[in-house]
Image: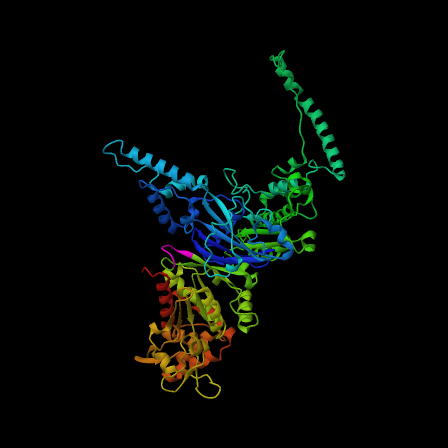
């Protein structure tokens, strides 16, 4: 058994959100405020009995709820008889399970028909009014009383609680609302729109999934005690010693259902207690005697004695119950747990949580001997939710955790030997390093939709990345390997910039930081493709619907034979050999025509599935003041365009680095006898430069020149200005 998918409706910004689950690991990724936390909280509240708050109701639905309240207070309004009108407004979650024929006995209470023989099984958990009649009458009563009080005194203008139904519910939500469960129709599981709630079917007021799914959750922003915290408080109450004590109490405590092997430790504990009591009695004897001299105890007063109650579990309560050895050779060099690094504390804490979740599920140790656990069957499905595990963790530690977490949860003999018992792990993260260690097919991308696209407020949708490229596609191999070999930060970005070389990748952040302040405030992912392969990312860009700027090289070439590279000039019948320009975004290769295309024609606006734009920019002709005469220089790549744009600066660069491209370019500028010689000379130097030399070109330039003094090439300025305006449309 496993969870196939969930569909969340009307929960915070998740107006309608479908999420497919992977068989083992499912990773939620996306930019800040994209809905990842909302999805995790929805799972916790619908499946793990966490309390709802009024803010869990999607804001855009509150006016509809108030309209219901406005009708209810009208004179003569009839009492509602059903919950149908709440269908479109309340938080709901559909959960679809895949149940095999030999597992039907687990779900016997929620099968849709007697003819159902396994396969897809769906239930809806809806946060609905418990008793609609009670809510109706009590709201009318309180509302009427408030309005009557307002009119009791003249010249006083005040609006008393409740002003409307939403305000009434904000204070009383869990008094009047609870989760109700309905069985869904498996035949409509693949429908584009969620099913309407089958109110005519039997409604479960108790969660029927209890006993089927065990849910455990590790919240975000975990932490442990800070030894330097002035007020002695903790960010959380979750010290490792407390976790260990909790685990000990449930699974290891010899005082609970003792077995023969526990008798030795119990005997030793009892002997220690007796010895300690004798010692205490001797030590307190003078103090007790002093009390007696003051008249206590009297004739009818009980005699004061000192006794202890020793428990093995109590030994894990003190500050140094868990220690870290600092030396392998000296056992005395130890510190309490709170003095270990916060990251490692959190790692140990999370792993210990996972082990505890697993052993609780399996009724490991003393748990299986406890009556309340022994009478309860082990759930066939274990769902574990981990929110932002990267908190305080070093990059490598993040990667180790995500690689090993599932193994920890399933590291049990019973789980390995019984295929009907499954674990599914769901993780939300802001870390590209965590995303990198996860199979591409397991990523679920949360996309923010702006106000007006589907609602009057910003909402979110979830995009399944498992089917972006197909199974055997070479592009899939390229992208997956590329992203895992570099970084996955585009999944968390507001926009992405694709560049072709190392030099652009190095200098672009300087340009953005110094000259585009609004863009610098955004989370921009700059991906270097290291070649003319931007088009290979197109399926992913289209899937993510993320604003994209492609900075391409025009790569001028002869229009014959093998398209040999050529110094760009007008009227020579040259073409662009860049696939991104010629075949993907512009679909034109004639050099003269490309140079004539206006800026607004370089943007492609996509309307489906969600609106976004892709903008390409490539080299524009540069006018150079060459010895007092304006000359047009056409660049083929970023490097030569940068030189032409900053002609005077490169002319004056002084460097002794004989082997560098910067010096070669500077020497060529100063040695050229004509503009034509300078143009072709710079082109040949940079064209023949190897990729590592071009990377060094950028580094040498940053070293030799303040990046603030560099003029941004016009085509790059054009693209960055477009992206800045796109991300800040109000301006």
Quarter of the N terminus within the rendering: bottom right
Quarter of the C terminus within the rendering: bottom left
The secondary structure making up most of the magenta span is loop
The reply to whether residue 37 is visible in this rendering is no
Q: Nearer the viewer, residue 712 or 616?
A: 616
* Residue farthest toward the top in the current orientation of the protein: 299
> Hey, which quadrant is residue 153 in on the image?
top left
Find residue 162 and report its horizontal and vertical position in percent: 35, 39
Find residue 437 and report its horizontal and vertical position in percent: 57, 61
Q: Is-magenta flag for residue 333?
A: no
Taking 329 as reference, is 191 above or below it? below
Q: Which of 77 and 284 is in front in this view?
A: 77
Find residue 99 and report its horizontal and vertical position in percent: 60, 56
* Residue farthest toward the left in the current orientation of the protein: 155
* Residue farthest toward the front in the current orientation of the protein: 114
The reply to whether residue 88 is visible in this rendering is yes
* Residue farthest toward the bottom in the current orientation of the protein: 561
Taking 121 as reference, is 477 above or below it? below
- The residues colored magenta run 454-459
Q: Residue at x 38, y 51 (%)?
A: 60
Find residue 453 and report its horizontal and vertical position in percent: 37, 60
> Hey, which quadrant is residue 26 in on the image?
bottom right
Q: Residue at x 51, y 77 (%)?
A: 690
Q: Which of 28 and 95 is in front in this view?
A: 95
Q: Which residue is drawn at 42% across and 42% down?
A: 132
Q: Which of 676 and 364 is in front in this view?
A: 364
């Amino acid at each position: 058994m496993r969870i196939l998918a969930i569909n969340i409706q009307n929960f915070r910004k998740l107006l309608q959100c479908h999420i497919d689950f992977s068989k083992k690991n499912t990773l939620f990724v996306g930019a800040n405020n994209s809905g990842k936390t909302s999805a995790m909280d929805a799972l916790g509240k619908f499946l793990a009995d966490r309390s709802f708050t009024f803010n869990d109701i999607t804001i855009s639905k509150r006016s509809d709820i108030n309209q219901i309240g406005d009708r209810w207070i009208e004179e003569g309004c009839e009492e509602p008889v059903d919950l149908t009108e709440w269908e479109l407004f309340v938080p709901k979650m559909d959960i679809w399970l895949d149940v095999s024929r030999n597992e039907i006995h687990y779900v016997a209470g929620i099968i849709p028909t007697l003819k159902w023989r396994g396969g897809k099984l769906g239930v809806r958990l809806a946060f609905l009014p418990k008793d609609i009649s009670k809510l109706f009458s009590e709201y009318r009563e309180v509302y009427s009383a408030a309005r009557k009080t307002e009119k009791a005194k003249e010249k006083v203008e005040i609006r008393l609680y409740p002003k409307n139904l939403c305000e009434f519910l904000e204070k009383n939500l869990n008094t009047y609302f609870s989760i109700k469960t309905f069985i869904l129709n498996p035949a409509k599981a693949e429908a584009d729109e969620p099913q309407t709630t089958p109110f005519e079917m039997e409604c479960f007021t108790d969660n029927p999934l209890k006993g089927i799914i065990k849910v455990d959750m590790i919240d975000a922003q975990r932490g442990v005690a800070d030894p330097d915290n002035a007020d002695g408080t903790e960010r959380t109450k979750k010290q490792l010693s407390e976790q260990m004590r909790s685990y000990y109490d449930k699974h290891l405590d010899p005082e609970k259902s003792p077995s023969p092997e526990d008798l030795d430790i119990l005997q030793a504990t009892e002997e220690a207690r007796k010895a300690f009591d004798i010692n205490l009695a001797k030590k307190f004897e003078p103090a007790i005697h002093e009390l007696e001299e003051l008249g206590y105890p009297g004739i009818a007063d009980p005699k004061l004695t000192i006794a202890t109650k020793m428990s093995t579990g109590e030994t894990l309560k003190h500050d140094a119950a868990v220690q870290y050895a600092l030396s392998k050779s000296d056992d005395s060099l130890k510190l309490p747990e709170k003095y270990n690094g916060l990251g490692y504390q959190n790692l140990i804490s999370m792993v210990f949580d996972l082990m505890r979740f697993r052993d609780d599920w399996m009724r490991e140790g003393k748990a299986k001997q406890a009556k309340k656990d022994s009478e309860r069957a082990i759930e066939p499905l274990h769902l574990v939710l981990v929110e932002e595990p990267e908190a305080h963790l070093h990059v490598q530690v993040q990667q180790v955790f995500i690689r090993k977490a599932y193994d920890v949860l399933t590291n049990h003999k019973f789980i390995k030997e019984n295929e009907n018992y499954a674990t599914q792990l769901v993780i939300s993260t802001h870390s590209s390093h965590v995303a990198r260690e996860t199979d591409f097919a397991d990523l679920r991308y949360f996309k923010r939709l702006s106000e007006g696209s589907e609602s009057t407020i910003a909402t979110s949708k979830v995009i399944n990345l498992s089917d972006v490229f197909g199974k055997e596609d070479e592009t899939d191999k390229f992208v997956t390997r590329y992203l895992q070999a570099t970084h996955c930060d585009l999944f968390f970005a507001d926009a992405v910039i694709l560049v072709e070389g190392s030099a652009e990748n190095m200098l672009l952040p300087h340009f953005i930081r110094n000259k585009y302040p609004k863009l610098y405030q955004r989370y921009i992912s700059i991906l270097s493709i290291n070649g003319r392969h931007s088009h290979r990312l197109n399926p992913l860009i289209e899937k993510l619907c993320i604003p994209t700027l492609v900075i391409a090289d025009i790569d001028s070439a002869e229009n014959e034979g093998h398209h040999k590279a050529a110094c760009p000039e007008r009227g020579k019948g040259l073409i662009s050999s860049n696939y991104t320009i010629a075949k993907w975004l512009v679909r034109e290769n004639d050099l003269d025509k490309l140079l004539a295309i206006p800026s607004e024609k370089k943007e492609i606006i996509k309307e489906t599935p969600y609106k976004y734009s892709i903008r390409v920019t490539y080299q524009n002709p540069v006018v150079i003041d060459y010895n007092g005469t304006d000359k047009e220089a056409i660049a083929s790549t970023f490097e030569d365009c940068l030189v032409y744009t900053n002609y005077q600066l490169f002319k004056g660069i002084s460097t002794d680095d004989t082997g560098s491209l910067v010096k070669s370019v500077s020497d060529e500028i100063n040695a050229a006898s004509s503009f034509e010689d300078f143009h072709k000379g710079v082109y040949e130097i940079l064209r023949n430069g190897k990729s590592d030399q071009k990377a060094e070109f950028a580094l040498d330039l940053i070293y030799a020149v303040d990046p603030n003094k560099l003029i941004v090439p016009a085509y790059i300025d054009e693209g960055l200005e477009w992206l800045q305006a796109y991300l800040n449309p109000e301006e």
